[in-house]
Amino acid sequence: MEPQPLLRVDHLSKSFPGVRALDEVDFEVYPGEILGFLGENGAGKSTLIKILSGIHSKDRGTIWFNGQSINPHTPHEAQALGISTIHQELALVPYLSVAENIFLNNEPRRALGLVDFPRMNREAEELLRGLGAEIRGSQLIRELNVAAQQMVEIAKAISHKASLILMDEPTSALSSREVDALFALMRRLKERGVAVVFVSHRLDEVRQIVDRVIIMRDSRRVGSLPIAEASEEKIIRMMVGRDVGLFPKEAAPVGEPVLEVRRLSGQNGVKNISLTVRKGEIVGLAGLVGAGRTELARLICGVDSLSSGEVLMEGQPVRIKSPADAVRHGIGWVPEDRKLHGLVLGMDVQENTTMAILQRISNLWGAVRQTEAKRITNHYIEALSIATPGLNQTVRNLSGGNQQKVVLAKWLSTEPKLLIMDEPTRGIDIGAKAEVHALMSQLAQQGIGILMISSEMPEIIGMSDRVIVMCQGRVTGEFVRGQLDQEAIMTCATQFLSVEGDIAEKVEAVAEGINK
Ligand SMILES: Nc1ncnc2c1ncn2[C@@H]1O[C@H](COP(=O)(O)OP(=O)(O)OP(=O)(O)O)[C@@H](O)[C@H]1O
Ligand SMILES: [Mg+2]
């Protein structure tokens, strides 16, 4: 007998005003299968996930689940059917605790119906530990960084007894170690017959974990390949419709130091960091999640305050007390969390792009010169190939990757001398990524210094002239281009960490609890 698919999607279509997001999409997933979804930014992947998880309603088509036609209208309904989702944009409640978020509407209770908080915290911590994350159950979500929030989101999804888990870019905020823990967990789920839909822009990860891959382009499914037949070139060609050269870091003349950081320490865990970025140089900051890289950027940009040390721009000591000071001194900062620090989602593309340069483009009376604002915005829409119906599209309605490009446009328009980029290509598709890398290379050639934080090893190795490795708030290694070696970097990145218990063993324990 033919095995029956767990989920079959038939001619699924969905439009938003002015945008066709899904056009007659067909596919199926079998129990115990990990199905990858790849496609350019705006191809329709998240829309698909949102329809399956009851957030958006479909326009046309049928969804078969366990042989029955379903049409979930709320996330709760989807969950009750056995469909659990990790969304691309984290959907946690910031002012509730980690445990409260994981067990929302599902809290363990004592007699009399009172929530059993100690048990809830304990169970949350166990789930997270199984993912290799040490996070207290009682901690508030808004106190966690993006990676930790991502781990909570994953723990939440696996805490339900689901037979299908939809994962929309679950690894985009994670570094290799957490990704390994997640993959170990996915393999255990697979053995138990749970099916996983895995959306990602990281090709190497997709090829490592999925059984089969569906490729989408322009809201249609353009291919389905067993992973053994899906070479990187083949995937990229199907996805983008052309060949793409990755990591085109070109030699740029390296000049005087633009940024010098001397013995910088802060309350946020940064300890005694010294480093230099020269004109035309791309310096990669490598390390595990939590190594203190983002915190270092926050100190330099005046978001967190220094406890000692100094910062020099072009040889002059500067006092930077706020991000506005940083802009004045020629520092652009592309933050890791675009929703929190990068963009105002309710404003349009033009307002976001020109937000940091309003003074420069205003007339004597303080009114924004509209023609100038339009010219600049159009320039970046073209330079970064931002897919938007126009300057006045609300940023919330752009796909994730295109939102990230608007953040880049906003900082590039300040014409900085130093650009600090925190995970600059997170969530960006492979074609756009090549464009962002080419742009970084171009900026370096124009003499801009770039400090690039990245958790993606191929990006660190491909783009950096020099790599500085951090672990637990300190610098633990430095490598120049030509001696870059993934293993040596990882050794430095884990220098102060004690040898951990076998992650697979912990995952086993967690998986025991799921789906029994
Ligand atoms: N709520 C909405 N209103 C209007 N348009 C939308 C809305 N949500 C998505 N879109 C549009 O639908 C298309 C598909 O978006 P979707 O988010 O599904 O893309 P994606 O494949 O997930 O992209 P990414 O890789 O960038 O996350 C895009 O053109 C997007 O701008
Ligand atoms: Mg998406």
Image (tube, rainbow, N blue to C red):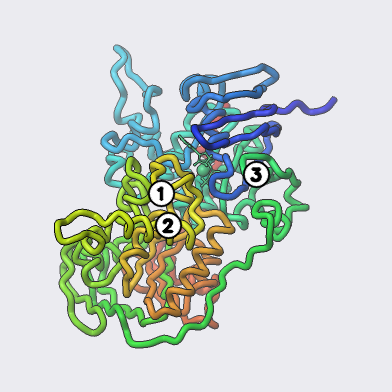
Q: Is mark 2 within 8 Å of ligand 1?
A: no
Front-most of residues 511 and 144: 144
Whole-percent x, y for residue 461 in the image? 53, 72
Q: CA distance from mark 2 to mark 1?
A: 7 Å
The mark lying in front, picked from 2 and 3, is: 2
Residue 97 placed where, x, y %? 29, 36
Outermost residue toward the front? Answer: 371
Q: Quadrant of residue 472?
A: bottom left
Query: Would you call the spot at circle 1 few (<14 residues within 10 Å), some (14-19), or many (20 or more)?
Result: some
Q: Amino acid at mark 1?
A: Leu
User: Residue drawn at (52%, 65%), measured in percent from left and top?
Assistant: 457
In contact (CB < 8 Å): disc 2 and disc 1: yes
Residue 257 visible (yes or no): yes
User: Pointers 2 and 3 in contact (CB under 8 A)?
Assistant: no
Q: Which residue is mark 1?
A: 391
Question: Quick one: SS at disc 2?
Answer: helix
Q: Point out the image quarter for the N terminus.
A: top right
Kindly indicate the quadrant of the structure image that contains residue 469. Answer: bottom left
Task: Name the disc covering residue 216, or none.
Answer: 3
In the rendered image, the vertical position of residue 68 relative to residue 378, given as above or below:
above
User: Mark 1 or mark 3, which has the lower sequence index?
Assistant: 3
Q: Residues within 10 Å of mark 2 (few under 14, many from 20)?
A: some
For marks 2 and 1 on the same chain, the one whose residue lies earlier in the sequence: 2
Q: Amino acid at mark 2?
A: Asn
Q: Residue at x 47, y 38 (%)?
A: 87
Q: Image check: 478 left or right of 68?
A: left
Residue nearest the viewer, comparing 109 with 399? 399
Q: Which residue is mark 2?
A: 378
